[in-house]
Image (tube, rainbow, N blue to C red):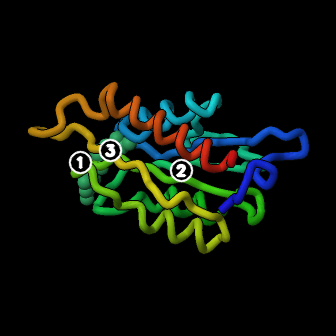
Amino acid sequence: MCRGMIECRNKLGIMISNVVYLSRKGGAQRIADAIAAECGTEAHNIAERHVLGQTDLLFVGTGIYGHQPEQEILNYLDNLPLNTIRGAAVFSVSKDGRDHTELVINLLRHKGIAVYPKHFFCPKQSLFRNHGRPNSVDVMNARAFAREVLNAYQG
Ligand SMILES: Cc1cc2nc3c(=O)[nH]c(=O)nc-3n(C[C@H](O)[C@H](O)[C@H](O)COP(=O)(O)O)c2cc1C
């Protein structure tokens, strides 16, 4: 993990954060947009064309399908060029609201990317439960999570 502000900044002294997500039904997208807003950037849907470039801190989010992240996001992370990302933080949205991001975390670590120890996970409305989630409180909590990670990486 980045140990202080100097290590996490580029030559101009600016820390570059990016947000990428996979979302089929919009739940992870809503959280990604909230995190991106806190970072002062825009979230990238991995299914759409985009260029990441050198990134100090990458937020990675996904919906959960069949107890795990979709294979597409694992492929996407696997294909990221080595040494372009310094640190990462992970979030997910699922019906049961539990953390199912282990595969994403293992993959990031395998690529030598330090992962923030706390993850953000949020329930999504299903037929009989969690009406309206992710809701405005979830959005607020996602922004607070992003702020916490940014502060930690900025030292
Ligand atoms: C095919 C499919 C499989 C799912 N499997 C799970 C699951 O195993 N566990 C869970 O908690 N939620 C599961 N869900 C619910 C999704 O995690 C939930 O809808 C979440 O919002 C998906 O993220 P998204 O809204 O960003 O697409 C599943 C949904 C679909 C459509």
Taking the image as shown, residue 89 lies to the left or right of residue 118, namely right
On whether ligand 1 comes within 8 Å of the CB at mark 3, the answer is no
Above/below status of 134 relative to 89: above
8 sits to left or right of 11: left
Identify the residue at the far top of this view. 136
x%, y% of residue 41? 64, 31
Asked if the beta carbon under badge 1 is closer than 8 A to the nearest atom of ligand 1, the reply is yes
In the structure shown, which secondary structural element does the residue marked by tag 1 occupy? loop
How far apart marks 1 and 2 lie (CA) works out to 18 Å
> In the rendered view of the protein, which quadrant contains the N terminus?
bottom right
Towards the viewer: 58 or 38? 38
Residue in the image at 65% along x and 57% along y? 87
Which corner quadrant of the image does residue 132 belong to? top left
Q: CA distance from mark 1 to mark 3?
A: 8 Å
Residue extending farthest to the left is 128
Instruction: Give the residue displayed 22% in from the left and 51% down from the top.
Output: 96
Residue 88 location, quadrant: bottom right
Q: Position of residue 116 (x, y in %)?
A: 54, 57
Horizontally, residue 118 falls left or right of residue 99, namely right
Query: Going from the N terminus, do you reach mark 1 or mark 3 first?
Result: 1
Specify whether residue 97 is in view. Answer: yes
Task: Tell me the element at label 3.
Answer: strand
Of the residues shown, which amino acid type is indicated by label 2? Val
Q: Position of residue 121 (x, y in %)?
A: 36, 49
Q: Are marks 3 and 2 in contact (CB under 8 Å)?
A: no
Q: Which mark is residue 82?
A: none
- Residue designated by label 1: 95
Q: Residue at x 53, y 43 (%)?
A: 148
Q: Which residue is mark 3?
A: 122
Residue, disc 2: 60
**Depth order, front residue of 66/61:** 61
